[in-house]
Amino acid sequence: MLTENPSLLLRYQERFRYFLIDEFQDINQVQYDIINMMCAHTRNLCVVGDDDQSIYSFRGSDPSFILEFDRYYPEAQVVTLSENYRSSHSIVSLANNLISCNRSRRAKQMNAQFTADELPLFFFPYDEEEEATMVVEDIKERIQCGAQPSDFAVLYRTHSASRAIFERLVQSQLPFSLAQDGESFYERRFVRYLLAYLRLSLDPNDEEAMSDLLVSLFLKQTLLKELKAISILEDCSLVKALVKLSTVQPFQRKKLKTIAPLFKQLSKLKPIEAIGMIETELGFSEFIKKRGNEGNMMERGADDVRDLKVVAKKFKTVHAFLAHVDEMIKAAKTIQQQNEAANAVQLSTIHRAKGLEYKYVYVLGAVEGSIPHDYALDANRNGDPLPLEEERRLLYVAITRAKHAVFLSVPSRRRMKSAQPSRFLKGFINKAAAGAQV
Ligand SMILES: Nc1ncnc2c1ncn2[C@@H]1O[C@H](COP(=O)(O)OP(=O)(O)OP(=O)(O)O)[C@@H](O)[C@H]1O
């Protein structure tokens, strides 16, 4: 509009003479073009930002706008704000050392104003479950010693990484809020599709589960009506009706004949074994292979299934596992509906915590594949190192949310496989192990 309508642009140019933009590191090309046009007549533009906190490339933001600002506005005066009033010396020192490894940045050192009793701490849980338990136990102890729930934030790279900590907090009765509009882990698409098999093994007439099952069997939703009709006319369950469908292709009928009788067996297995059977004998792995990478490159179906297995292995029966799943879905709904509690432990992705601060910050999953995320590792392998730099900035943002203490969790296992410490932290972990300040 502004490029095609000069009089409109002029109206805005005459209306505003001075422009101040905060969080300039997050600007994208369209926003940058708009602001350039609006202030073209005066060039009265003041921008504030931190190139080390540019973490929104997925929305089109690009740190080069702030890094090259003085090239486009050579008359600009650059003022470096290097005093950090938020975090202790040791946190700022860790953050400085971490971010200095990035290449595309303006060289600067932040200076802290105070020293806290606690140094940044690495801890090494066995897996996601133990990680969550250790965090909640530590929070509980600190609260017993006088800390407030709102002093704490638990930060993670992606929503799905909050599953275990969410569950442990529900069980702990500590007040907490979740900074995400979202579904429970168990309502994620691929998790739900897999759970549908388990649900139908206990209740072969579960319509919702049958509707999900049709998706993973590559069958049309319209067949649900036919299944219901068959189940009434022939007085059989929806699962049994699968083999009587008349409108499917012969190869589909053959497959349905093989899998329908297996549902009963599933209910008798341990949940982790049942999932194995669903993947192999009931064809779920094939479905994940074909459809699991659709949509979001950040959160893949195959990863969700691995996350689900981590929790499934804790339960002895499918019944107990599904009861837990339903309890957690209910708890997630309750938490979503509650107004944000004022005095609560905050669970948040690192992205959502930007701009905020907490006395104590726990960073979950500081391992390869989580932070840096797999997608950045893939990009790096394919010759693009920039996403890796953004991942380092994310870790920088996470660490600099802490005022007094930051705790970085480096689990030995993630998603049922052995995990490597984040490449961003390896040097610091070695130093910390040797007793030196990181
Ligand atoms: N001059 C000051 N003296 C004392 N405290 C200050 C001063 N300036 C800021 N602070 C405190 O430092 C903390 C960080 O400030 P603020 O949130 O404004 O920084 P910021 O640059 O937006 O941080 P970030 O971008 O990392 O989120 C806040 O707790 C704020 O109250």
Image: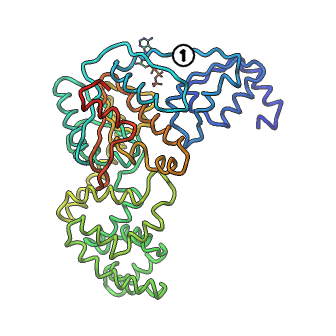
Q: Position of residue 235 (x, y in %)?
A: 31, 85
Left/right of residue 26 with respect to residue 183 in the rendered view: right
- Ligand 1 within 8 Å of disc 1? The answer is no
Q: Nearer the viewer, residue 431 or 124?
A: 431
Chosen colour scheme = rainbow
Say what secondary structure mark 1 lies in. loop
Return the residue at label 1. Answer: 80
- Location of ligand 1 given as a quarter of the image: top left
Image position of 5 with respect to 295: above or below: above
Q: Is residue 4 above or below residue 405?
A: below
Residue type for callout 1: Thr
Residue 222 x, y percent position in the rendering: 49, 75
Quadrant of res 9: top right
Residue at figure coordinates x 41%, y 45% from the top left? 158
Measuring 37% from the left and 26% from the top, which residue is drawn there?
94
Q: Nearer the viewer, residue 413 or 128?
A: 413
Please state if 24 lies on the left or on the right of 158 as rendered.
right
Please name the residue shown 41% across and 82% down the image. 229
Which image quadrant for residue 269? bottom left
Q: Does 222 sit above or below residue 377? A: below
